[in-house]
Image: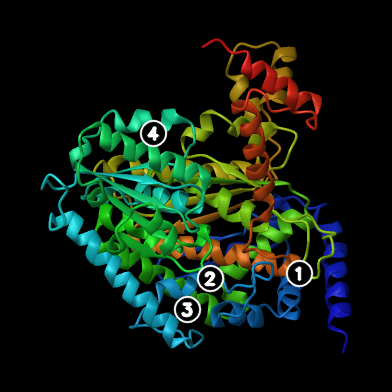
């Protein structure tokens, strides 16, 4: 049996069948199958995944299931959880699932007892510190309770915690957390302008403790403390890192250094001590609920059959969009104000994980990999870029997210919010009826010529795919599940493309070049003969700035 050949045959079969599928509209697919919603949706205790508005038919769906079985996705999932070194370039495991280990629901695939013990020990240590900050047991150098947290990090050290705290803002009853992730000094100066240094704790989050942007911001923040007369500065600084020596050399007390392991990638790390700002903001009990939700998602991913496995289906839908229908982007639209940062978070999660060209065997992928991820919050987006979604020349699939229940104190808006979300998915799928438009316009005093003209301009063709995630309510547990499902979706896609979803080596070049250019900018006599004319011209123009 030739597995590679079987995979190739199945892939060709999927592409061949797609030719006829592309000729059918979503309207036609729904007309042909009255049970389409039932067949193309999955319901769990607190989540409905509805992908019936994707332009895929039953045969293609079954072929995708056969394909994912043939490539051995279940075996790959076990490798992920078992801690095999699937991050081949860095020769590391990708054991972020171990970070949400739940003693009440242990997963059989988590077999490394030493790592489990380390995770639980560090988790308890971090959570105790968070509670001590919240309760006022750990005080500032002036014996005051901390009111503000200045979190300094970038990328995965920042995006995840920032998104979660924003999502859980109804539960945020602890100190205010302010995120500094931009090297632009305005980010830091604007934030500290409203803070009191006597009641501000600085968290420096850097896995390597060598990230240039983070250390520059950290030094400036510490100087702000000095300039404002803070004597015992060490009492105001905490580090989250894999480099104990780096943090100690920076001047941080060892008891204020929290550990992250080299087998955890930054964009998968919010479950670790990188979640310290989350625990400080919303409390340890709710942070644990987030972990429990993610653990339940892990259990589901490991043990549910492929046909009912939410992250696997999410991955297959994404592959269908990207490689069969040839859509280059995906738009993420949560109809949930507190999920406004989710599109940015998923942007990093997907594009940094799967924005790769080389496969595991070092050959160049013949398939397009990660789509461009972008989005915004409903209903705001309906009044900005949704014009393009409905009548533009590109087909852009949308992932809608909406809660059945709201945590807002203003309950009366929610029915209309949900109505808007469902209406947008319906409008994208089925478009408008020419007859209805003509009937509506006929009630106005228009000439036949103007009526025909307006009818054409008001028509919406439809046949734009979307998937809707409808969750019960945005609780900590549900949020944990959603994030873990999206993490696993990314892994599934990486397995299909045969790429390493757990490195990000492409970002290193820009860092190196930035250092070289900074030397040219700061050293007046340094020659820049090796630069291209554009870069040299930009540097020259910058140097000629007025002081």
Which labelled disc corresponds to residue 263?
Answer: 2
Q: CA distance from mark 4 to mark 2?
A: 31 Å
Residue 51 appears in the rendering = yes
Q: Residue at x 69, y 28 (%)?
A: 526
| Secondary structure type for disc 3 | helix
Marks 1 and 3 close (CB-CB < 8 Å): no
The mark nearer the N terminus, 3 or 4, is: 4
In the image, which disc is placed on residue 299?
3
Comes first in the chain, label 1 or label 4: 4
**Cβ–Cβ below 8 Å for labels 4 and 2?**
no
**Circle 1 — which element?**
loop
From this view, report whether residue 338 is shown above or below residue 192.
below
Name the foreground residue: 319 vs 128: 128
- Mark toward the viewer: 1 or 2: 2
Label whose residue precedes the other's in the sequence (1 or 2): 2
User: Above or below — where is 203 with respect to 32?
Assistant: above
Give the numbered dot on residue 360: 1
Q: Position of residue 60 (x, y in %)?
A: 76, 67
Kindly give the residue lying farthest to the left in the view shown.
143
Secondary structure at badge 2 equals loop
Using residue 204 as the reference point, say whether residue 455 is left or right of it.
Answer: right
The CA distance from mark 3 to mark 4 is 41 Å
Q: Please report the residue visible at 51 percent of the width from the left and 52 percent of the height from the top.
A: 210
Question: Rounded to the nearest whole Å, what is the CA distance between mark 1 and mark 4?
Answer: 40 Å
Q: Which residue is mark 4?
A: 188
Q: Earlier in the sequence, mark 2 or mark 3?
A: 2
Give the alpha-carbon distance from disc 1 to disc 3, as whole Å. 27 Å
Q: Is residue 285 visible?
A: no
Residue 452: x and y in percent read 73, 20
């Amino acid at each position: 049996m030739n597995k590679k050949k079987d995979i190739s045959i199945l892939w060709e079969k999927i592409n061949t069948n797609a030719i006829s599928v592309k000729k059918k509209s979503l309207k036609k697919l729904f007309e042909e199958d009255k049970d389409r919603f039932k067949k193309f949706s999955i319901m769990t205790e607190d989540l409905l995944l509805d992908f019936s508005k994707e332009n895929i038919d039953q045969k293609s769906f079954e072929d995708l299931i056969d394909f994912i079985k043939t490539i051995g996705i279940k075996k790959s999932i076990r490798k992920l959880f078992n801690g095999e070194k699937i991050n081949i370039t860095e020769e590391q495991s990708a054991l972020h699932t171990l970070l949400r280990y739940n003693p009440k629901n242990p997963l059989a695939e988590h077999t490394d007892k030493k790592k489990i013990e380390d995770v639980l020990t560090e988790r308890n240590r971090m959570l105790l510190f968070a509670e001590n900050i919240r309760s006022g047991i750990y005080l500032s150098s002036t014996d005051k309770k901390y009111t503000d947290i200045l979190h300094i990090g970038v990328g995965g050290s920042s995006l995840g915690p920032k998104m979660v705290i924003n999502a859980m803002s109804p539960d945020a009853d602890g100190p205010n957390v302010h995120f500094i992730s931009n090297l632009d000094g305005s980010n830091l100066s604007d934030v500290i302008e409203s803070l009191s240094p006597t009641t501000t704790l600085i968290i420096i989050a850097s896995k390597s403790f060598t990230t240039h942007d983070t250390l520059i911001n950290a030094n400036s923040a510490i100087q702000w403390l000095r300039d404002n007369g803070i004597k015992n500065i060490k009492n105001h600084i905490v580090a989250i890192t894999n480099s104990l020596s780096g943090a100690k050399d920076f001047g941080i007390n060892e008891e204020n250094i929290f550990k992250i392991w080299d087998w955890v990638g930054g964009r998968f790390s919010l479950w670790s001590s990188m979640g310290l700002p989350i625990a400080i903001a919303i409390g340890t009990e709710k942070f644990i609920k987030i972990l429990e939700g993610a653990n339940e998602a892990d259990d589901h991913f490991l043990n549910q059959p492929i046909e009912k496995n939410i992250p696997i289906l999410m991955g297959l839908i994404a592959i269908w969009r990207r490689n069969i229908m040839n859509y280059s982007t995906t738009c993420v639209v949560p109809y949930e104000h507190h999920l406004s940062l989710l599109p940015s978070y998923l942007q990093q999660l997907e594009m940094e994980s799967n924005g790769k060209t080389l496969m595991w065997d070092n050959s160049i992928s013949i398939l397009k990999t990660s789509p461009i991820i972008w989005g915004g919050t409903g209903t705001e987006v309906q009044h900005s870029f949704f014009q393009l979604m409905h009548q533009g020349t590109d087909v852009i699939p949308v992932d809608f997210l909406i809660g059945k229940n709201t945590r807002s104190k203003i309950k009366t808006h929610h029915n209309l919010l949900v109505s808007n979300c469902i209406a947008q998915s319906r409008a994208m799928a089925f478009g408008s009826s020419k007859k209805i438009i003509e009937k509506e316009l006929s009630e106005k005093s228009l000439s036949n010529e103007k009526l025909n003209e307006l009818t054409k301009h008001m028509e919406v063709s439809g046949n734009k795919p979307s998937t809707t995630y409808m969750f019960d309510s945005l609780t900590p547990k549900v949020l944990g599940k959603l994030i873990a499902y999206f993490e696993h979706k990314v892994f599934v896609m990486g397995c299909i493309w045969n790429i390493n979803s757990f490195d990000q080596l492409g970002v290193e070049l820009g860092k190196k070049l930035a250092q070289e250019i900074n030397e040219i900018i700061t050293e007046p006599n340094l020659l820049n003969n090796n630069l291209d004319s554009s870069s040299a011209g930009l540097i020259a123009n910058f140097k000629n700035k007025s002081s």
